[in-house]
Amino acid sequence: MPEGTLCNKQPVNTKEQLQALLADKSGKQYYEEMNDLDVDRKALWGTIQKSLKSRTKTWLDICSHCGLCAESCFYYLANKRDPKQVPSYKIQKTLGELIARKGDVDNAFMQQCMDWAYSKCTCCTRCGVYCPFGIDTGIMFSYLRGLLYGQGFVPWEMKIGSGMHRIFRAQMDITTEDWVDTCEWMAEEYEEDWPGLEIPVDKESADIIYTVNAREPKHYPEDIAEAAILFHVAGENWTVPSEGWEETSLAMFAGDWEAAKLQVESVYDAMARLKPERMVVTECGHAYRATVIEGPYWAGLKSGKTPIESLHYVEWVAEALRTGKLKIDPTKKIKEPVTYQDSCNYIRNGGLADVAREIMSYMADDFREMTPNREHNFCCGGGGGLNGIGRYREQRNIGMKVKRDQVLATGAKLVIAPCHNCWDAIRDMEEIYKIGIRWSFLKPLLINMLEVPEHLKPKEE
Amino acid sequence: MYEFLTGPMVWISFGIFIIGLIVRGVRYVRGLDWKLDRVTYGENISYGVRGAIRSILFWIFPYGTRSWRKNPWFTLWVFVMHFGLLITPIFLLGHNILLKEKWGISLWALPEAVADTMTVIVIVSVVFLILRRIALPEVRIITNWYDYLLLLIAVSPFLTGFLAYHRAPDYYFWLMAHIISGHILLIAVPLTKLSHFLLFFMTRAQLGMDYGIKRGGMKGKGMAW
């Protein structure tokens, strides 16, 4: 059987395909079919020849095998310094061998590549920072994921995720109607406590267009309400688009570059339609990376920038605190020790380390840095889509030990994690290792410590 | 034989060395693809240049980066070896006398004792790197015969030169071995991983541009290498 009914080389473009995949509990049938999936060697080699350019080729060619990347990798550290977790080894045994064999590989090799590309690398790109030649193994694993996707070797959840983007322009099955309804519902729900609270949909020429992670309307709608409250208190002229509101990209994690392009273009279209001044992205790392950092390239924008200026949520918060749009009641600052999880995607790969510290200076009396931190911080353990993949749960949980020990060393019991992936990973880490910590996004903490102007407070009865 | 190796062969080796490196460099740059690499090399040039220069400068100095500082012994021996490899042959008195004889030009020459010490240091550092490859599991697993061959190619001219200079038995043999291994080294640079002679600067500049243009270079103070 060259192609399975669920596991095949075809992208998921219809709701029927998606339903069939979702009905296959934990991807049982999907992974069984994968064992029989043929490798189209000619197509694979053709893709490599077209897409393997001098940057990646040179990285693979000149690696001196010095091993400095070993200690940069949290998997290597978490797995008791297993030499098989050295980034150079991992990439040479997968992508390196795939190229050396000119794509002449079998099913077992492709499955090993998939397992390694997802369960031994979260594409955190830390190794690139420790390599004298600047060899970025995370980027190469991301490239490998694209090759694997083209051949149908992709984890079940990622196949579903990229299909969701293709069909719903969101990582989850949320229609435009669902989204708009959720915004209206949240505005109504919180209006009593915050008179005049609005979530304006499709308002033209606003100062800010706000975009989110689909998990918010799906699982944490109060996050949208909290964003609304903070914009409301800050007096911002803002809006959300009815379409093009989703920032995340499971398609990026899946290596489905076509879907990744479709997804970011929906956001850029909303910018063109509503003509806002700037975009603010919710507290999510990979979403920012996908839509703001990498997206312009997928969409072929020669400037390498989003059509309008785009800010991560932490940039907006820092600006609002700096300019006094948001004021913090000094008596309500966080008194207990608190630490901050630097997300790989907007700190190492987005340059926002100082912005995060600026926010902490307003919010916390006893801010404790993790070691290492900022651009050198370790992945939470759940990046690169790993949080969502059942097949690699065990490997992920082992990888989390590095973050667990980093957090414990700070002595803080509260971890601020303005990134959905980090937030999830830290939640799961507490569930598994029970170290007695709490975790939070910025929004709920900020709302609790705000100085609210009199006219925005609810009228006493 | 000696006449050929110190005459026409010098032209051949240097020809391969220089032309080979030029070809390597040109091919690298031509193979960059702004869309696939996702770095706008041609736009945002000032950020790109700044990122590239920072990326090279931090790494070209010993202990300039966190990675160098985390590995103090490795860093020491690697820098000492590269310094010796590059400087000793150029400023060696013997080479300059030869140069004077052949072409009538010569450079400033190192005192012989200094050059001799540097040669020993190069040999010792190569021994250190070989032992490190054997001793550390994380390095051993990625090491293959090719890595040892490159170390051998790099150290051979120093080892043979040292023996010839100190008049080891069979002087002529060691002298010829020195000259031949020197040619091999020159030719190997563009044709092997030793091409990092040039490509180090290329890949460092590339990742520097990536960080300088796209990955936060326009927002933060620049990557904290």
Image (cartoon, coloured by chain):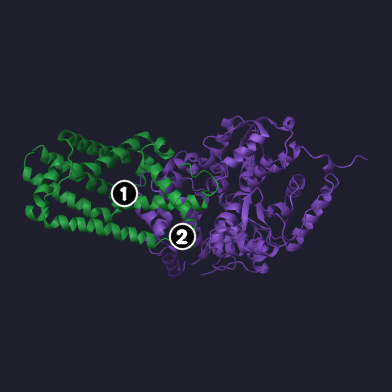
Chain colours: A purple, B green
Q: Describe residue B107's horizontal placement relative to residue A150 as left or right.
A: left
Task: Tell us which disc is closer to us: 1 or 2.
Answer: 2
Q: Is residue A71 above or below residue A312?
A: above
Q: Which residue is labeled 2 in the image?
A: B42
Residue B144 bears which disc, if any?
1
Q: Describe residue A158's horizontal placement relative to residue A180 as left or right.
A: left
Specify the subunit that label 1 lies on.
B
Q: Nearer the viewer, residue A434 or B168?
A: B168
Q: Amino acid at mark 1?
A: Asn
Residue B5's spot in the image, x, y percent? 11, 54
Residue drawn at the location 35% of the way across and 61% of the way down: B27
Marks 1 and 2 sit apart, C-alpha to C-alpha, by 38 Å
Q: Describe residue A296's horizontal placement relative to residue A108 as left or right.
A: right
Q: Let me know if residue A159 appears in the view.
A: yes
Q: Is residue A116 above or below residue B160?
A: below
Q: Look at the numbered disc 1 and give the secondary structure of its residue.
A: loop
Residue drawn at the location 20% of the way across and 45% of the way down: B90
Q: Residues within 10 Å of mark 1 (few under 14, many from 20)?
A: few
Residue drawn at the location 29% of the way across and 48% of the way down: B147
Q: Amino acid at mark 2?
A: Gly
* Pointer 1 or 2: first along the chain: 2
Q: Let me know if residue A36 appears in the view.
A: no
Residue B76's spot in the image, x, y percent? 33, 35
* Quarter of the N terminus of chain B within the rendering: bottom left
Q: Are marks 1 and 2 on the same chain?
A: yes
Q: Residues within 10 Å of mark 2 (few under 14, many from 20)?
A: few
Specify the subunit that label 2 lies on.
B
Residue A348's spot in the image, x, y percent? 53, 45
Q: Nearer the viewer, residue B80 or B126?
A: B80
Q: Find residue A178 and report its image quarter.
A: bottom right
Residue A197 bears which disc, if any?
none
